[in-house]
Image (tube, rainbow, N blue to C red):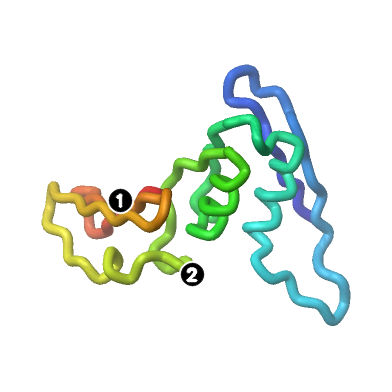
Amino acid sequence: MKLWALASSQNSYLCNFQVYIGTEKGSAEVFLSYHVVYDLMQPYLHKSYKLYNDNLYTSPRLVKDLLKDCTYLIRRVRCNRKDFPKELMSLKLERGTSELQHCDDTAVIGKDKRDKRDVYCI
């Protein structure tokens, strides 16, 4: 059993939550992380809120769909996500450099973390 929660960053107020007890027998959860975020945000769409979440739940598709509903998502994104710009992932960034890619109203930034891995923000 899992519990997902949407909370306000200003006052830690619990705005919405969802209990997940697993999939039905014989069915597979497709885009579970997308649906969790989108379902929790339903009462707050079209109000120009900014959403900050864990990169496990962030995807380019979610960002685009929330933007259509006047909701902004700003977060790190995993480069192995579906619809992630392949051009940005294939770049070999040198230490201290960054690269920006635009697609419609969405921007993805690849930035060197001064570590062994690059960091991508969307």
SS under mark 2: loop
In contact (CB < 8 Å): disc 1 and disc 2: no
Image coordinates of residue 92 in percent, x first then y, are: 17, 66
- Residue under the point 33% across and 71% down: 86
Image coordinates of residue 104 in percent, x first then y, are: 41, 55
Residues packed near mark 2 inside 10 Å, few (<14), some (14 to 19) or many (20 plus): few
Q: Is residue 12 left or right of residue 64?
A: right
Q: Nearer the viewer, residue 49 or 105?
A: 105
Residues packed near mark 1 inside 10 Å, few (<14), some (14 to 19) or many (20 plus): some
Q: The disc labelled 2 sits on which kind of residue?
A: Lys
Q: The disc labelled 1 sits on which kind of residue?
A: Ile
Q: Which residue is mark 2?
A: 82
Q: Which residue is mark 1?
A: 109
Q: Is residue 46 left or right of residue 108?
A: right
Image coordinates of residue 74 in percent, x first then y, are: 46, 41
Farthest residue, direction right: 25
Q: Nearer the viewer, residue 60 or 79?
A: 60
Which of disc 2 and disc 1 is earlier in sequence? 2
Farthest residue, direction bottom: 26
Image coordinates of residue 47 in percent, x first then y, are: 64, 30
Which quadrant would residue 71 be assigned to in this image? top right
- Residue under the point 31% across and 52% down: 119
- Residue under the point 82% across and 49% down: 19
Count of all numbered marks drawn on residues in the image: 2
Q: Nearer the viewer, residue 32 or 3?
A: 32
Which quadrant would residue 49 be assigned to in this image? top right
Q: Is residue 60 left or right of residue 6?
A: left
Q: Is residue 56 above or below residue 69?
A: below
Look at the image and tell me in which quarter the N terminus lies: bottom right
Q: Is residue 89 left or right of residue 19?
A: left
- Residue under the point 58% across and 39% down: 70
Q: CA distance from mark 1 to mark 2?
A: 16 Å
